[in-house]
Image (cartoon, rainbow, N blue to C red):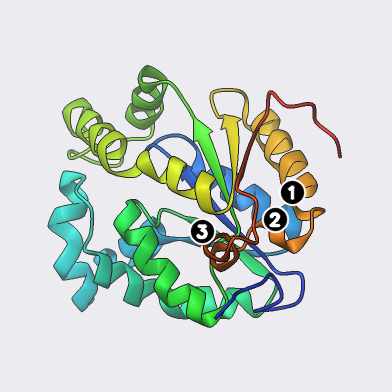
Amino acid sequence: MQMTMQSAAPRAKRILMVGAPGAGKGTQADAIAKQFGITHIASGDILRRHIAEATTIGRTVEDLVNKGELVPDAVIMDMLRKPVLAAADTGGYVLDGFPRTVEQAEAAYRTAGNLGVGVQIAVHLEVPEEELIRRMLARARGADDTEDVIRHRIKVYEEKTRPLLEYYAQRELLVQVNGARPVAEVTWSIVVQLQRAFKRPATQAGSHAGAHAGTARPATTSDSDKAVA
């Protein structure tokens, strides 16, 4: 089954934010969601709500989250299915926090692709490690947010999540952004690149199934490119 941008709501925008812990994914996802009138789906916030409410999912994943480990794919997929479907029907989404591995991305594609709600564009926020650590220590929530735990989370990201960049560059459009700059500058760069990307024909703006069928042109853009509104 070939998926196109029209598989869900007409002209829906389905965006994935990728970046290390502390890169500003949540902040930028909020801003982008407001800019385009779509839904911000934050897997981390949903998980923390489950933990706070001591649901079955919360009790299952609490220890893993506190240690900075990845939550099992099946748990996240089940948790996100309804929010993703609902958002795709109402204009689209900005997904923040999942997938975090190539394996998760492949599993998500198998599910979302069949439903026509898969990611079209991935946005990567690049931030130096020491800046990530500084940010995360400044916003530490509790005793588990130590520098050792933070460094472990960054190491897990480098080993497990960074390979997603190549994965999405080969299948959809990957947007690269310098996330170390002031928040407003980062937001502006993302918005400009997304506006440019969504003006492209559907086969170039991102169809995972199309990429497999040879109809899409994988591409990478960065905020070093000449910006056009």
Q: Can residue 165 be seen in this view?
A: yes
- According to the image, label 2 marks what residue? 205
At label 1, the amino acid type is Ala
Q: Where is residue 119 in the image (x, y as percent from the top left)?
A: 55, 62
**Whole-Å distance between the Cαs marked 3 and 1?**
17 Å
At label 3, the amino acid type is Leu
- According to the image, label 3 marks what residue? 95
Front residue (pair 113, 66):
113
Position of the N terminus, as image quadrant, is: bottom right
Could you tell me which residue is drawn at 16 percent across and 54 percent down?
64
Q: Which residue is most to the top?
A: 130
Q: Residue 27 carries which label?
A: none
Q: Tell me which numbered mark, 2 or 3, is placed earlier along the sequence.
A: 3
At label 2, the amino acid type is Ala
Q: Position of residue 6 (x, y in %)?
A: 71, 76
Crowdedness of circle 1 by 10 Å Cα count: few (<14), some, many (20+)? Answer: many
Crowdedness of circle 2 by 10 Å Cα count: few (<14), some, many (20+)? Answer: many
Mark 2 or mark 3, whichever is nearer to me: 2
Secondary element under disc 1, as helix, strand or loop, is: helix
- According to the image, label 1 marks what residue? 197
Tell me if label 1 and label 2 are in contact, CB under 8 Å.
yes
Position of the C terminus, as image quadrant, is: top right
Secondary element under disc 2, as helix, strand or loop, is: helix
